[in-house]
Amino acid sequence: MNIKIQLVFNEENTPYLLDISSLLYDFELLHDFSLVICSEEYSDYRFSRYFWYRNGRPVKKQHRLRAARIIKESPLTIELIFAGITVFSGALWVMVQAIERIRDWNLNKEKLRREVEKLRIENQLRRVELDQKIQEKKASFEIFNSLMRRLESNSINLVDMNIDVDENNRDTFTYR
């Protein structure tokens, strides 16, 4: 099963390319961080300065975050596809908790909570407490906090997020 999440950001006609590329990379880092602390497959991973490097995390190819669509209009819209392991390991819930913590992102948090609750019920996900998972995996709070600061400091802010479940259990969504 795959999950598709659509992220809609604040309207800015000509954002800096560095802000866009940093935003995309930081979402990749957040995904990988969440997966590494939640999935037993990555339980041997030890956080270090190499986490920030392009190939510094051991995430398998089939578990990587995929881009279904990126629309650079006003507003910037990104559709991401998360592999089933991200959902079943609890990593998606960790990501959503992290996104909710970013204070400058004016999201409809009640709508987001309802979508995640529906997803959790449909897939019988267990609740994952972010801080507890970070402690259990001996992950560095410094890395997590630094990642949150990077996302907060980006001039491109998230304003809406929609979560869709691939009900047919297909391997992938249709790419456009």
Image (cartoon, grey):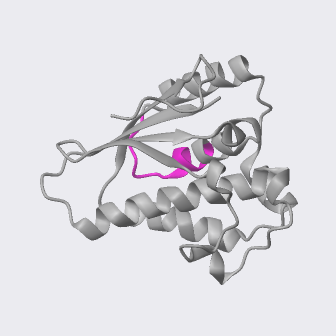
Q: Nearer the viewer, residue 86 or 126?
A: 86
Residue located at (85% from left, 60% from top): 43
Q: Residue at x 73, y 71 (%)?
A: 140
User: What quarter of the picture does the C terminus occupy?
Assistant: top left
Tell me what residue is drawn at x 67 percent, y 42 percent: 86
> In this rendering, does residue 154 appear at all?
no
- Give the quadrant of residue 20: bottom left
Report the magenta residues as a range. Answer: 97-107
Q: Nearer the viewer, residue 131 or 125?
A: 125
59 w.r.t. 77: above or below: below
Q: Position of residue 148 (x, y in %)?
A: 53, 62
Q: Residue furthest bottom?
A: 49
Q: Is residue 114 magenta?
A: no
Residue 146 lies, in percent from the top left, at: 56, 71
Q: Is residue 101 magenta?
A: yes
Position in image of residue 53 (x %, y %): 56, 77
For the point 69% across and 17% down, the residue is 122
Snapshot quadrant of residue 171: top right
